[in-house]
Structure formats: structure tokens, C-alpha cells
Image (spheres, helix red, strand yellow):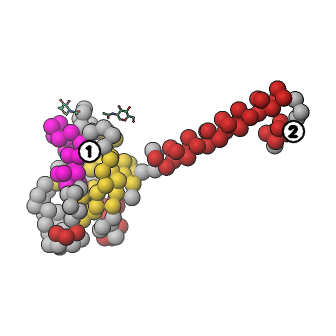
Amino acid sequence: MALSDDVHVPCTGKMHRSLPLLQRLALFSLVVLFFLHTCCYGDVGTAARYAPPYLPTTCYGSDTSEFPSSNLFAASGEGIWDNGAACGRQYLVRCISASLRHACALNQTIQIKIVDYIQGLPSPPSARNTTMILSSKAFGAIANLTTNSPAINIEFQQ
Ligand SMILES: *[C@@H]1O[C@H](CO)[C@@H](O)[C@H](O)[C@H]1NC(C)=O
Ligand SMILES: *[C@@H]1O[C@H](CO)[C@@H](O)[C@H](O)[C@H]1NC(C)=O
Ligand SMILES: *[C@@H]1O[C@H](CO)[C@@H](O)[C@H](O)[C@H]1NC(C)=O
């Protein structure tokens, strides 16, 4: 262990060099932890949108009480459906890129709830085969609607 050896050397010059090294290591660890927890934890996928009517849903039928009052909800695509276990799951979602310029609203993260399934949606999604299909309100919160982009690339995290 070179670090502890350095600390026991009586030469103060060496000690002064070893302390900043420890501090740098500590700082480096903190930065790594910070990024693991805040930046890069999510999965990457795609999102389309759909408009009313939203009922009935595969998860809850005609029960409107399961819709979040924020109107930030989504239908699950095939990839995260998990045989129906996706119903009720909440995800943090943000737009990371899109094929059309300016299509992402930067720095916007929303929390959505899964209330439906891509198969049998009561209204058609704006794009096929996406990870999830966001409600109009949810899509508009993280994307620039004036670009009319049918789909965006997202980062999402449960
Ligand atoms: C939204 O998209 C329009 C059309 O591409 C663009 O002119 C506008 O600058 C965009 N707005 C933002 C906030 O990016
Ligand atoms: C987004 O966040 C970054 C870093 O936090 C900041 O530099 C940038 O100005 C923000 N952009 C907008 C459009 O708020
Ligand atoms: C959906 O996308 C996946 C990969 O993203 C692909 O493997 C699959 O064939 C696609 N399914 C349909 C029906 O397009």
C-alpha cells in the first residue's frame, strides 16, 4: 500500500504530496458516485404519443381513478410490459434526442404512470414499436410539439 507508506515517512515534503492525493481520490470517488446516482442510471428507449380517447385501458378498463391528476401517464410498449406487471409502474422520463432538430425540451424530467398497453390502445400512437407511448400532456412536457416529431429518444428510470 503505497499510500499508507507515504503517510509514515517522516519527510514532510512527501506528506504534503500524499494528502492532496488522498483528497483527489476522495473527490474522484464522490464524482463517480454522483454520476452513478443522478446522471446515468436510466435505460435508453423511444417514446411516441397518443391523444384522447384514453379509455378503456388494458390495465384498468374504464376506471379513471387510476389516472394521475397530473395527466402525465403512458402506455407500455412491448419491451417493458412484463406480462402486465408494468401496470401502475412509475417512471422518470426525459428526452435525450430526436431525429428532428429542436424536438427535445431540454432539462425537463417528468414522472409518468403506466396505465395501458400498446396493443389495443383506444387511439393510434404517433409511431410504432416504441418503448412507451406518452399522453399528449406528458409528451408535450418533454418535447417541442411544434416540431411535430412522431417519436423521441428518451432516458427512463423506474
Ligand atoms: C420548437 O420547434 C420550432 C420548429 O422547429 C423551433 O422554431 C423552436 O425554436 C423550437 N423551440 C424550442 C424551445 O426549441
Ligand atoms: C440545462 O442544464 C444545463 C446544466 O444544468 C444548463 O447549462 C443549461 O443552460 C440548461 N438548459 C436549459 C435550456 O435550461
Ligand atoms: C420492434 O423493435 C425491435 C427492436 O427495437 C425489433 O427487434 C422488432 O422486430 C420490432 N417489432 C416490430 C413489430 O416492428
State the residue position of label 1. Answer: 142
Horizontal side, residue 8 vs residue 50: left or right: right
Residue at disc 2, secondary structure: helix
Horizontal side, residue 66 vs residue 28: left or right: left
Residue type beneath disc 2: His
**Lower sequence index among marks 2 and 1:** 2
Q: Where's residue 45, x and y in %?
A: 34, 49
Q: Where's residue 104, x and y in %?
A: 27, 39
Which residue does the image show at 15% across and 37% down from the upper left?
Answer: 146
Q: Where's residue 131, x and y in %?
A: 30, 54
Q: Where's residue 6, x and y in %?
A: 83, 36
Q: Residue 48 carries which label?
A: none
Question: Residue 39, located in which quarter of the rendered image?
Answer: top left
User: Circles 2 and 1: CB distance less than 8 Å?
Assistant: no
Q: If the image is split into quadrants, where does the C terminus sit?
A: bottom left
Range covered by the magenta-colored residues: 133-152
Residue at disc 1, secondary structure: helix
Question: Residue 22, located in which quarter of the rendered image?
Answer: top right
Which residue does the image show at 18% across and 51% down from the upper left?
Answer: 137
Q: Which mark is residue 8?
A: 2
Q: If the image is split into quadrants, where does the N terminus sit?
A: top right
Nearer to the camera, 2 or 15: 15
Nearer to the camera, 90 or 152: 90
